[in-house]
Image: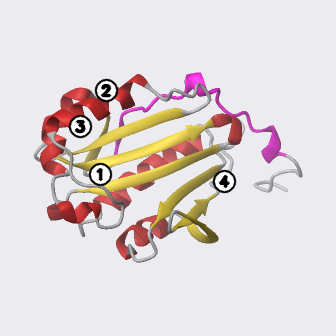
Amino acid sequence: MEGVPRPGAAAKVRRPAARTVHAAELTTRRLDLVPLRVEHAGEMALVLGDPVLHAFIGGAPLSADALRARYARLASGSPDPAVVWCNWVLRLRGDGRLVGTAQATVTPARDTAELAWVIATPRQGRGFATEAARAVTAWLAELPVGRLIAHIHPDHHASAAVATACGFAPTAHREDGEIRWEHRPPAPPNG
């Protein structure tokens, strides 16, 4: 039957080796998702500087110097060779300003990726997080990655709405007070 996978077909989908996964530049209607670089730290310190952003994720805003050090660590890659860190800044196509970040921690051997997104407080409520998360979700599905995960605070309704819009559903699993959401994208067609 056309369009219906054979039993066991999903197990035969080739998964990428960790060393072949790299954050690619992604585009949406309004955003360019640009792989994170140390040079983004100065502008991102302003974008992420509102303490309100940390209400659900913890911590506090970092200075430009602290972000430079963090971005240098992220750019050097995961110390675990089986894990790949993919990080993007979100640049508005209209005015070129940065409005947030998206990230995916990809573990090819486990066929998983963990996603997260953050949008600057004054830019929230305009669909940027959903737009970016959909782009990352689609990119991961094409790699392919079979299980996508997001950890969301139970009171963070906006982030839950983003996850829902991207096809994620909450699970019963809790970790550090957050709900694990999962999405299993369909396997790409054999090409």
Report the residue marked by disc 2: 72
Nearer-the-camera pick, 175 or 8: 175
Compare marks 4 and 3 and give the one earlier in the sequence: 3
Q: CA distance from mark 4 to mark 2?
A: 34 Å
* Residue 16 shown in magenta: yes
| Cβ–Cβ under 8 Å for marks 1 and 2 | no
Compare marks 4 and 2 and give the one earlier in the sequence: 2
Looking at the picture, the colour scheme in use is: secondary structure
Q: Quadrant of residue 127?
A: bottom left
Q: CA distance from mark 1 to mark 3?
A: 28 Å
Report the residue marked by disc 4: 186
Report the residue marked by disc 1: 29
Report the residue marked by disc 3: 67
Look at discs 4 and 2 and give the one toward the viewer: 2
Q: Which residue appears at 65% of the width and 26% of the height?
A: 17
Disc 1 crowd rating (10 Å Cα; few below 14, some 14-19, many 20+) is: few
In this picture, which residue range is highlighted in magenta? 9-27
Q: Which residue appears at 80% of the width and 56% of the height?
A: 4
Look at discs 1 and 4 and give the one toward the viewer: 4
